[in-house]
Image (cartoon, rainbow, N blue to C red):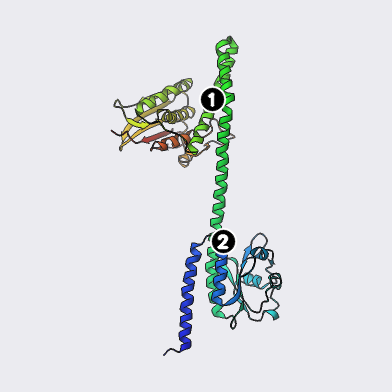
Amino acid sequence: METPASENSLRQAAEQLARLIEISVTLNSTLDEQELLQFIIGTAAELLDCESVSILLYDEIQGRLVFSAATGSDPRKLSEIPVPLEGSVAGKIFRENRPLILNDVQNDPRHFPMVARHVGVNVHSLIGVPMRIKDRLTGVLEAINKRRGEFDEADVDLLSIIASQAAVAIENARLVHELRQAYEEIQAADQLKTNFLALASHELRTPLGIIIGYATFLQEESPGELSEHARHVLNAAMQMRTLVDAMTNLNMLRAREMVLHRLTIPIQMVLQAACNEIRSLADAKSQHIVLDLPAEPLQVEADPEKLNLVFVNLLNNAVRFSPADGNISVGARLEDGQVLAWVKDEGVGIAPSELRKIFQEFYQVEAHMTRRHGGLGIGLTIAQGIVAAHGGHIWAESEGLGKGACFKVALPPASP
C-alpha cells in the first residue's frame, strides 16, 4: 500500500513530466532568441523552486562564457560580465563537461564572486549543468539559491533535461535569425541591382538617341570614308541600344510590370519574323537558317512583340556560339497538347552542369577575363520570364561541349 509521501512523490514526478513535455513543445515552436531565453530561465526557476536561473553561452571568438539571460536581471548589464573558463564554477562545468552542485557557495574557492557583486545577488547554493548539442558544448545552465532544502541529483537530472532541449532550441533560433539576416541582405542587394538597371537604362536612352540620330544623318549626308566611319558609330550605338533594351526588359520582368497585349497568332509568324531580324547577322558568318514549320497554323495566344524577343534572343545566341558555315534549325510542332518551338545550332554546346544555370541573371558560361562572346548574360533570363508570363516553359538540351544545343519553348495552344 502506498504511503502519502510516495503518492506525493509520484504526483510531483507526473507534474514535472507534464511540464517538461510542455517545455519541449514551446521550445520547438519559438524562434525568437530573447523570448526563448526568458522562457527557459523562467521555467527552470519554477521547476527547481529556486531564486534565479542563468544561461551562459560560449563565445568562440573570445574563448569565454557570456551571460545571455538571467532571472530578474538586465541582459545588457549581464553581457558586460566576462566569465573565464579558469577560476569560475561555470568555467569548470564547461571545461569538465559535467554537472556540479555547490550547497555552500560562500566557502567554496571555485565560486566566481564578480557576478554576484555586479547584479547584487547573494549566492548561497548553486547548481550547474553543461549545455550541449550531441558532442558539442554550447554553454552552461545554472540555478542559484534553492528556496527549500538543498540542490540534489534529482535537480541535476531535471536541469540537464531542460539544458539539452534549450541548447537545440537556441541553436535553431540563431540559425533562423542568421537565415533571415542573410535573406534581408540578399533582398537589399537585389534591390540595389534593380535600381541600377532602371537608372542606367533610363539615363543611357537620351544620349544614345542623340548619337544614333547624328550618326544616321552623317552616314546619309557624308561622302566616302566619312560615311563609313559614321556607319561604324551607328552600328556600335545600335548594339548599345540593344543592351539598354535588354536591361529595361529585365527590369520590367523583375518588377512584374511587363504588360502583355495578347493576340491569337500562328507561332510560324513569330518564328519567321525573328529569323528575318537575325538573318543579316547569320549571313555575315555564312550561316544557314533552316526553317522546319508545318503548313497548318499552330495558334497561340501571345504578345507578338514580346514573343518575338524570345526567339530573337535564342537565334542571336545560336549565331554567336555557332561556327561559320554552320546550320541553325528553327521549327515547331504540336506535341503533348502544347505548341513546341525550337532553335537548334551546331555550336559550342553546353555542359550538363550548365543547362539550368544559363537562365540565371548575368550568368556567363565563359570566365569574364577570357570570354570570346559578347553580351550581358541576361538574354535567356528575359526569354524565360516572357515565356513564363505566357504560361509556357523554356529549357535547353545539349549532348555536351562541342555538340551544339537546342533551346525549346512549349506554349499552351490558343483556345478554339
Residue 26, given in percent of the width and then of the height, sits at 49, 66
Q: Which residue is mark 2?
A: 33
Residue 36, given in percent of the width and then of the height, sits at 55, 64
Q: CA distance from mark 1 to mark 2?
A: 53 Å
Q: Residues within 10 Å of mark 1 (few under 14, many from 20)?
A: few
Q: With 59 as the anchor, is 350 left or right in this view?
A: left
Figure check: 397 above or below 1: above
Q: Quadrant of residue 1?
A: bottom left
Image quarter of the C terminus:
top left
Residue type marked 1: Gln
> In front here: 23 or 276?
23
Q: Quadrant of residue 84?
A: bottom right
> In front here: 42 or 222?
42
Q: Which residue is mark 1?
A: 239
Please name the residue shown 47% across and 70% down the image: 22
Q: Residues within 10 Å of mark 2 (few under 14, many from 20)?
A: some
On the question of residue 237 being in view, the answer is yes
> In front here: 357 or 177?
177
- Of tags 1 and 2, which is closer to the observer? 2
Q: Secondary structure at mark 2?
A: helix
